[in-house]
Image: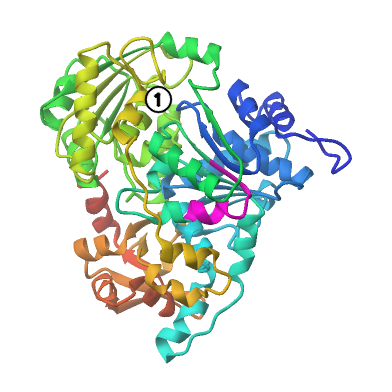
Amino acid sequence: MCYVRFTMPCPESRIYRALVDRGFYSAKRPLIEHVLENLGPGVNVVQLPTGYGKTALSITCGLKSIVEPREYVRAIHVLPLRSIIDDAYNSTVENLQKIGITNPTEAVAEQMMGAPGSPFLNKDIVFVTYETFRLHMMKTPPHEIKNIFCNALLSGGWRTYGHFEISRGAIFEAAVFLDEPQLMSDENDSTLPSILNALTCHGRFLTLMSATVSKGLRNLARETAKKFKVEYREMIYGENMFDKDFENTMKSKKIETHLEEASLEDVVRDKLRDAVWDRVLIMANTVEKAKHIYSLLSDTNAALLHGRLTKKDRLNVLNNLKKGKKWIVVSTQVVEAGVNISSELMITELAPASSLVQRAGRVARYDNEQEGMIVLVKTDPSPYKEKTVAKTYEVLRNALNDGGVSWRAPSPEKGIGYSQLVDIVHGDQRFITNHYLLNQVINPLSTSHQALSLLQESLATVYVADEVDKVKEEDSFTIDLETLAKKFPKTPAIILKEDRPELEHGLTAGKINRTAYPALFMLCRDVIGFLMSKEVYRNAAYGVSP
């Protein structure tokens, strides 16, 4: 690697090659090197195939910022799901240790609820959830929210702390990577275009990257760059950059696709009857459906994976999947992005095209795997929009009758490729800017308390233990407070009193959810989470004893 600061050029591509040579990555990906050589200030849109290793972009840029902090002084990698932050962070730390970095946590951090590795986002490589990143942009860093708002709510007087500019400064002098931005926005969410506007107006390094960047999202990025007169770059696999060796490997794979109009239960029973598959991934669109399918497979030693498992349970499942040669796992959307597992057979409920492409990336994922099968089951579209799922179904049905679907080629010679599928279904997506939010982010005169009306999400940490003095971070999971209050309204709150957790029986999830600002109420009352017994958790998470 390059260690001479300022006296010699140390481009990102050179650092990437050094990481490959030292064993940080098992193989060099030519397009990663190509993208690193072409990234620059302004807005970059990068589309790479699933499993290609795009996380290398942020890691390489973060390491480059250590030895040559000229154009940016850190890399901030923004991810949409909490469930994939741990995997990205842990693998980065482990690989840095493998190449001889003795204290990688001094430079690398994960930042989200329950993992305050870099409260003001000022380490060299920061993995952060989109919800936390958005709060920092809104001048309401989670670490400071209590100080900003609680005096006002309890005594009626506002006090604004200036610490929010520390994390915002860290963002604006960083290379920011928005990973899987299509999962950060839907038709009812106007925060993503507002955040893009705010980042672009400062002319810094901004990169949107995914295997499924729709034309609608590309148009948003292009128009935003044009508005603020900054450079715009597109690096799209299959359009203006190619990897022939990778493409040939993908073309050699034989992945069958079938579309079924039956219940998920019947399809699962039918496909598993012959027991010819060693690794089976069954994907449901909701936790309740996943639990139901899991209960039907109680005699198969199947595993269950969803966002309401404790960190320890989730990591145990993922580790077993990576080590095991034969398994069946029932999962929700938590494996769509950032989870490096590979199945031979995937049975999935129908979902929007962009989600299906991500799911398909978990079939015959590795270079040495040649065959696989994907079974798409048309069921209730919930929680997705019925119109989007219906359009996906029609496009897939027509494609399967006319050349098939290629989940590995963006634009094949016959049939339809994954990039074409996404563009047809999501290409006309329109994004609306929330101007109130945009003003909050970019107006130097706006203050933190003006963001109060924008703080709508109330996420809660649930600790699984039979006694409050035995709670551990690894035995916790996060859940929307409204969902917790609906399903378990009497779940007692845990408050922090003199640096010790104590149970507050009179304060429950149901009562807190009925307050005007539940998230702020929890902060002001020092509510650090809720206590759920092991028995209740087993029933809630698995439906049966795991």
Element type where label 1 sits in the image: loop
Q: Position of residue 258 (x, y in %)?
A: 21, 18
Q: Considering only vertical position in the picture, is 66 above or below 363?
A: below
Q: Nearer the viewer, residue 193 or 366?
A: 193
Residue receiving disc 1: 342
Residue 110 seen in the figure: no
Image quadrant in which you'd find residue 488 = bottom left
Q: Nearer the viewer, residue 281 or 303?
A: 281
Label 1 sits on what residue type?
Ser
Q: Which residue range is magenta in the image?
A: 195-207
Quarter containing the C terminus: top left
Q: Is residue 458 magenta?
A: no
Q: Considering only vertical position in the picture, is 507 above or below 467?
A: below
Q: Nearer the viewer, residue 384 or 500?
A: 384
Q: Is residue 206 magenta?
A: yes
Drawn side of residue 379 relative to residue 463, left or right: left
What residue is shown at x 39% (from left), y 38% (from top)?
Answer: 216
Residue 105 seen in the figure: yes
Picture mark count:
1
Image quadrant in which you'd find residue 62 = top right
Q: Considering only vertical position in the picture, is 146 above or below 397?
A: below
Q: Position of residue 3 (x, y in %)?
A: 83, 39
Q: Nearer the viewer, residue 448 or 203?
A: 203
Drawn side of residue 488 relative to residue 34, left or right: left
Drawn side of residue 384 relative to residue 201, left or right: left
Q: Position of residue 43 (x, y in %)?
A: 57, 42
Quarter containing the N terminus: top right
